[in-house]
Image (cartoon, rainbow, N blue to C red):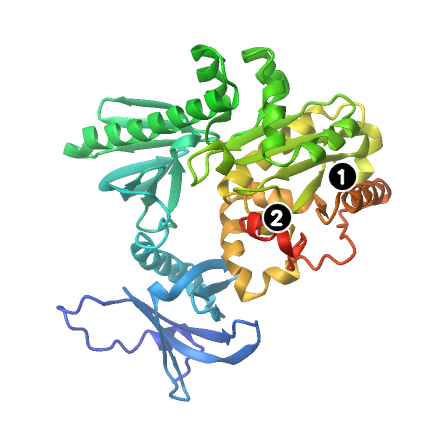
Amino acid sequence: MDYSNPEDANREVPAADAEVKNKVLFKTAGDYAILTAAGAEQERGAAKIILKEEEISFLPDNGKALNIDIREIDQAAADDYRVLMNLKSGAAVEISRLGYQFEDFWRHFSAAWNAVLIDIFLMKEAADKGSARARVLRSGKDLGECQIQFYETSFLVLPRESGLFKIFYGDVDEMKAQDFKIALSAEEENIELSQMGQDFDFCAKTINAGITAISLSAQAQIKEMIPGLDSLGVRQLAEVMRDGRCAAKSRVDSLAPGTWEKIEDFLQVAGMKEEYDYLKSLAGGGEIYAGVKRGAMGSLSGDYAWFLVPLKNNNAIAMEASSEGGSGKATYFFRLVAPLEFEAKKNDLDREVQKTAAAVQKCVRRINFRREPIYLPEEKLQDPKYWKYKFALAQIPELRFLREIFIGRALHRSPEIWRKDVQKLLEFNAAAKDGAKWRADGDDLESPAVPEQNNAQNQNET
């Protein structure tokens, strides 16, 4: 039998026991490769591939079968007609040469993986708030009947024939529940839930409670950060800064005059005031953004803080983000426009600043303030230990955009070295004619970016 032919792979169907839970979902043939945790190729060949509800089997013609429990899969992504599966052990499996059955295989695999991801996808969520079924429209696309799994800060949507996705309550700008439908406006997409039957009230109340909790948490944050601010001002600021969103200085000034200085004072507490002041001195009066996000410690000392400073004269915008409990490891820089366009646009960059700030804001919140997915070069993303970021790249267009415009990072090795690296980076950017990246001397993009004694306080920034 020629296992390289998908039609041959489908000729034989193993005897199926109707009582067996782990039933066969899909059969095909293709190539597989097993990679070690270090990225070395351990085995490669052609095989018959059998996907079941709880496992995937590879049956090569040498008889050395391999069964992988789907629960062992830490991340998976479809890229260039390959399926990349990163296992919890650190090893990885690549599937390729599926021919015309690639899309069908990925669809069946996604459904099987979704079914087990409920147990592992939101492990850090504080509480399971129940589940329901609903017909889901996502920005006008009908996803059919989906399972909805509710958690404390988000809910998970599991379609039958496409990948799962999360809706964070902090992203919801508006909610309407009427005529047995729930309509949500969440940043740039709209979600509609319908056909919930008797679960309509439960779904509406659960989502409303989640949105309310995020709002109250943000208001408590603002009260601690800006003592004495009146209740209406607190609510207005909490709306624009909820769940880690960054707010423009002009927006803060219009909502609560005189409070921006309090935010700057908080950056001192967060250990970022020196970097903020220096970058602000280079900004030339451009719009500045700042945000905070409540961390696991439940007080401002344990929150994430971050800011964006546009350096329009240098065709760049700088991002600094602390880790929970300490300052960050590096400052990240992004181009505002392509180098060849800078001279023509340098006097009118406000639109590019707003676009980049919006992308940074959405992206860093989606990847939970991790920076690795932004700065790792393409060759490192081929390492199995970073395949999880391939999954993020497939799901987050803003991440792909930021990787494209990323210039480089200045490490926090000492204040003097950091300032020199900032200047070197900006000089490099001024001379660049394409999308070249800058790298500081000694930065291998993997080793700790701060002195060893500071690693404990910066362990959350990877």
Name the residue: 31% across, 52% down.
Answer: 118
Q: Secondary structure at mark 1?
A: loop
- Residue 215 in the image, given as x and y percentages of width and height: 39, 24
Front-lying residue, 266 or 347:
266
107 shown above or below 176:
below
Name the residue: 57% across, 42% down.
Answer: 326
Residue count near mark 1 (Cα–Cα under 10 Å), binned few <14, some 14–19, many ≥20: some
Front-lying residue, 89 or 162:
89
**Is 328 on the left-hand or right-hand side of 45?**
right
* Quarter of the view holding residue 361: top right
Q: Secondary structure at mark 2?
A: helix
Front-lying residue, 310 or 220:
220
- Residue 266 in the image, given as x and y percentages of width and height: 58, 27
Q: Which residue is mark 2?
A: 374
**Residue 51 visible in rendering:** no
Contact between marks 1 and 2 (CB within 8 A): the answer is no
Report the amino acid beneath label 1: Ala
Q: How many marks?
A: 2
Where residue 352 is drawn, which disc sits there? Answer: none
* Quarter of the view holding residue 330: top right
Residue count near mark 2 (Cα–Cα under 10 Å), binned few <14, some 14–19, many ≥20: many
Front-lying residue, 291 or 151:
291
**Is 41 on the left-hand or right-hand side of 25?**
right
**Residue 319 visible in rendering:** yes
Q: Which residue is mark 1?
A: 338
Front: mark 1 or 2: 2
